[in-house]
Structure formats: structure tokens, C-alpha cells
Image (tube, rainbow, N blue to C red):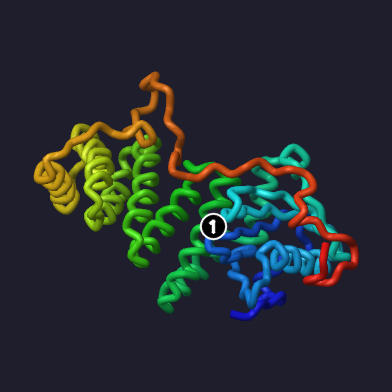
């Protein structure tokens, strides 16, 4: 692929009337694939992702004629970096406590400039063209930033994780698909049991493709607990869901192994149970906190793209 600094369409630019320091977002996947504002950057040669991100964000700053903020989730180093980039191309990193004040108004302004639903549409377009890698990376970027901004239990974050799980399934990564789908089901069982059955069914469909005996037993036991809880609540109404619950029970019995739910993924508890809640998404790899002065995101004024820092 070749690197491109120019937006593919005008929808990739923030509104000219956007509030100062509207926060852009960028994402670097573990394989180096790089996303800025829901668009996969075309990278060529040995172009480092951090340089591509700085160039792209500086372009936004020049377009707006004002400094731009950016949040970069970099999974290659398990870190989130927060940046200020100026129209002259200079940039610096700041610590979490120096970032823009959080809050609903800020989140609403950012998502008005870069609507999550527009990003979902772009993901679907890639998937329809069988560009599954691009679709999956864009879905991961969307889920990561929505989770960081809104929390794992937010409805948009859950929907993005469900899309990511489906794309992992389409790509044949059934272990990752199971993990993602189980997280959605686990959260749904805790927050809205009446809507949980379809999510448990999706997790079951991915689990049925697993072959590792340990994972089959461990993940299957959690699924079985979810199905039994739905049944006890009178929410196991669909014949297809009843059949899936029985399939989980039968597969575990045939394997001769039944293990308790793992400590890292306990069964969801009803609200008000008095028990200490488990992490909403324990499989999410934690990100290191931002430090000031990260060299790879620091650039002097007027430095041309690709020049030494």
C-alpha cells in the first residue's frame, strides 16, 4: 500500500465551525495498521505509524488554522498517548490530567464531528467488499475509542464490540470472536438481562467453532451458566436459543469436563446482589497511562514530514 496524507473525502475533515481543540482519534493495531478518525491510512515502505499520525493530524490543524488535540491508542506498545498538534506541524504529548476536560458535552461535540454511525457504515462497506482485515481494524479502533470515551458498558461500545466479534468470526479467528462476544453477553447479562439472549447466542455460535479442549470447557461453562440464568428468569423462549443451550450442555457432557467459571470471567450477577462487580471487560488489555514528552509523538515547528525529530 502507499501512504497518503490527504483525506479520501470531505467527510474526513472536522467541521470548520467545530469547537477549538476538538479531539481527533487515532489507533495503531498490533500489526501496525493505522487508523485516523475512522479511516485506515495507506502506509508505504517503512513509514512508522507515529509519523503518519502526526502528518495526518497536522493536516487537520492546518485546515482549521488552530491547534488540534488527538488521542492515540497504540496497541503495539499498549499505550494511550494524548497530543497537541499545531498548524506549523509542531506537536507535544501531555499527561492524562492535562487533557481536555471530560464530560458529556465534550463527547457529544466530538461525536457530532465524527459520528460513530458513519464509521459503522464505512466498516460495513469494507466487509461487503470482502476487505475483512480493513473492516476488522476499523471496528477495533471504533470499539477501543468508544470504550475509552464512554466505558465498556455503554450501548455504542457494546455494539462496536459485537461488530468486532462478528468480523473476527468472518476472518476465521474463532477464539477472539468468542472472547469478544462473551464479553458483550457478560455485560448484557449484568445490565439488561431481558436483552441478553441474542448476545449469548452469538457467543455460543463462535464457541461452537473452538477445538481447544481447555477453552471449550472454560468458555462453555460460562455460556451454560448464562443460558441457565436466562431459563430461570423465564427468558429462554426462542426454540433456537433453547437448542443452543442444549448444545452447550451436551458438548460439555460429552467432553467429560466441567469446570467452574474462571476467576477472570465470572458469571454476571444480578444488580443489587451485594457482590463486588467484576471488571466489565476483563479481556481488554490495559493501556499504560500517558507520559509527557513521548519522543515518538514530539515534533519541532516547521519540521518536514519524515525529517529527524
User: How many numbered callouts?
Assistant: 1
The quadrant in which residue 221 appears is top left
- What percent of the width, then of the height, locates residue 126? 47, 74
Please tell me which residue lies in front, 131 or 239: 131
Please tell me which residue lies in front, 150 or 293: 293
Does residue 55 appear left or right of residue 282 in this picture?
Answer: right
In the picture of the structure, the residue carrying the numbered disc 1 is 142
The structure residue drawn at horizontal position 25% and vertical position 42%, both measured from the top left corner, is 223
Q: Compared with residue 276, is residue 217 higher up or lower down, i.e. above or below?
A: below
Q: Compared with residue 84, is residue 45 higher up or lower down, i.e. above or below?
A: below
The structure residue drawn at horizontal position 83% and vertical position 60%, both measured from the top left corner, is 299
Q: Can I make out residue 301 in this image?
A: yes
Does residue 118 appear left or right of residue 128 in this picture?
Answer: right
Q: Quadrant of the N terminus?
A: bottom right
The structure residue drawn at horizontal position 49% and vertical position 51%, both measured from the top left corner, is 156
Does residue 43 appear left or right of residue 191 in this picture?
Answer: right
Residue sticking out furthest to the top = 274
Q: Secondary structure at mark 1?
A: helix
The quadrant in which residue 118 appears is bottom right
Amino acid at each position: 500500500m502507499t501512504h497518503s496524507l490527504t483525506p479520501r473525502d470531505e467527510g474526513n475533515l472536522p467541521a470548520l465551525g467545530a469547537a477549538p481543540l476538538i479531539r481527533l482519534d487515532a489507533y495503531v493495531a498490533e500489526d501496525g495498521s493505522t487508523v485516523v478518525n475512522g479511516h485506515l491510512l495507506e502506509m508505504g515502505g517503512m513509514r512508522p505509524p507515529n509519523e503518519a499520525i502526526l502528518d495526518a493530524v497536522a493536516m487537520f490543524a492546518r485546515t482549521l488554522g488552530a491547534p488540534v488535540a488527538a488521542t492515540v491508542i497504540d496497541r503495539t506498545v499498549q499505550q494511550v498517548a494524548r497530543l497537541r498538534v499545531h498548524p506549523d506541524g509542531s506537536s507535544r504529548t501531555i499527561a492524562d490530567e492535562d487533557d481536555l476536560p471530560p464530560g458529556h458535552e465534550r463527547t457529544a461535540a466530538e461525536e457530532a464531528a465524527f459520528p460513530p454511525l458513519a464509521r459503522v457504515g464505512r466498516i460495513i462497506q469494507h466487509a461487503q467488499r470482502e476487505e475483512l482485515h480493513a473492516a476488522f481494524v476499523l471496528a477495533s479502533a471504533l470499539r477501543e475509542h468508544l470504550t475509552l470515551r464512554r466505558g465498556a458498558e455503554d450501548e455504542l461500545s457494546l455494539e462496536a464490540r459485537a461488530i468486532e466479534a462478528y468480523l473476527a468470526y468472518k476472518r476465521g479467528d474463532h477464539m477472539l470472536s468468542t472472547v469478544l462476544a462473551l464479553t458483550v453477553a457478560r455485560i448484557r447479562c449484568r445490565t439488561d438481562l431481558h436483552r441478553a439472549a441474542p448476545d449469548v447466542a452469538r457467543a455460543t455460535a463462535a464457541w461452537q467453532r473452538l477445538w481447544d479442549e481447555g477453552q471449550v470447557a472454560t468458555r462453555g461453562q460460562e455460556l451454560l451458566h448464562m443460558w441457565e440464568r436466562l431459563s430461570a428468569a423465564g427468558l429462554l423462549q426462542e426454540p433456537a436459543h433453547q437448542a443452543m443451550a442444549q448444545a452447550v450442555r451436551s458438548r460439555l457432557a460429552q467432553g467429560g469436563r466441567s469446570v467452574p467459571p474462571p476467576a477472570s470471567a465470572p458469571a454476571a450477577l444480578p444488580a443489587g446482589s451485594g457482590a463486588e462487580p467484576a471488571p466489565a471487560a476483563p479481556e481488554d488489555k490495559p493501556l499504560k497511562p500517558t507520559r509527557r514528552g513521548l519522543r515518538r509523538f514530539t515534533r519541532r515547528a516547521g519540521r518536514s514530514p519524515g525529517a529527524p525529530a
